[in-house]
Image (tube, rainbow, N blue to C red):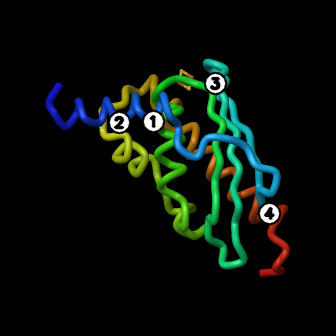
Amino acid sequence: MDNTELMYQEQILDHYKNPRNFGRMDNASVHHHEKNPLCGDEIDMFLVIGKNKKINDVKINPHGCAISVASASMLSEEIKGKSVEEIERLKKENILEMLGIPISPVRLKCALLPLDTLKNSILIFERYVRKDGA
Ligand code: FES
């Protein structure tokens, strides 16, 4: 493992031990829960989306392996202030780049659980919550 990979590995462990934006909230525009059926790990995501369709706040409550928790934590930092359109454009590649270490096919579901949760949260928001008639 080279120095860069080691640095990313340490970063993942740090996010796993101290997930950023950890918690729950009562005033979320949307709250969504997802589970990895293969292992039972789960995540709750809470988003506050403003009238300008930007993510004003986010809270995550992940229970899972290091990769899934770190991915959720990093993603929560990444999306603050981003627009719904920017979120919709996020891809698997962005998550893998953010994590920075090679992810085996078996762990891919772990890495992508937070992104799936985020995308589905936005879908729910757009379909059922948004009331601006746009
Ligand atoms: Fe369950 Fe990674 S082992 S999400």
Q: Nearer the viewer, mark 1 or mark 4?
A: 1
Is ligand 1 closer than 8 angstroms to the Cβ of mark 3? Answer: yes
Q: Could you say where residue 21 lies in the image, as x and y percent from the top left?
A: 58, 46
Q: Quarter of the image containing the C terminus?
A: bottom right
Splitting the image into 4 quarters, where does residue 81 fall? bottom right
Name the residue beneath numbered marker 2: 11
Task: Identify the secondary structure beneath mark 1.
Answer: helix
- Residue 109 higher or lower than 100, as above or below: above
N-terminal of the pair, mark 3 or mark 1, is 1
N-terminal of the pair, mark 4 or mark 3, is 3
Q: Quadrant of ligand 1?
A: top right
Q: Nearer the viewer, mark 4 or mark 2?
A: 2
Marks 1 and 4 sit apart, C-alpha to C-alpha, by 32 Å
Residue visible at 68% across and 58% down?
Answer: 122
Task: Identify the secondary structure beneath mark 3.
Answer: loop
Amino acid at the residue labelled 2: Gln
Splitting the image into 4 quarters, where does residue 57 fall? bottom right
In this rendering, position of residue 7 left or right of residue 104:
left
Amino acid at the residue labelled 4: Arg
Q: Which is nearer the eye, 57 or 71?
A: 57
Q: Could you say where residue 125 lies in the image, as x and y percent from the top left?
A: 76, 61
Task: Identify the secondary structure beneath mark 4.
Answer: helix
**Do labels 2 and 1 touch, CB within 8 Å?**
yes
Marks 4 and 3 sit apart, C-alpha to C-alpha, by 26 Å
Within 10 Å of the Cα at label 1, are there few (<14), some (14-19), or many (20+) other Cα atoms?
some
Marks 3 and 1 sit apart, C-alpha to C-alpha, by 17 Å
Marks 4 and 2 sit apart, C-alpha to C-alpha, by 36 Å
Q: Which is nearer the eye, 125 or 60?
A: 60
Q: Which is nearer the eye, 117 or 73?
A: 73
Name the residue beneath numbered marker 1: 15
Name the residue beneath numbered marker 4: 127
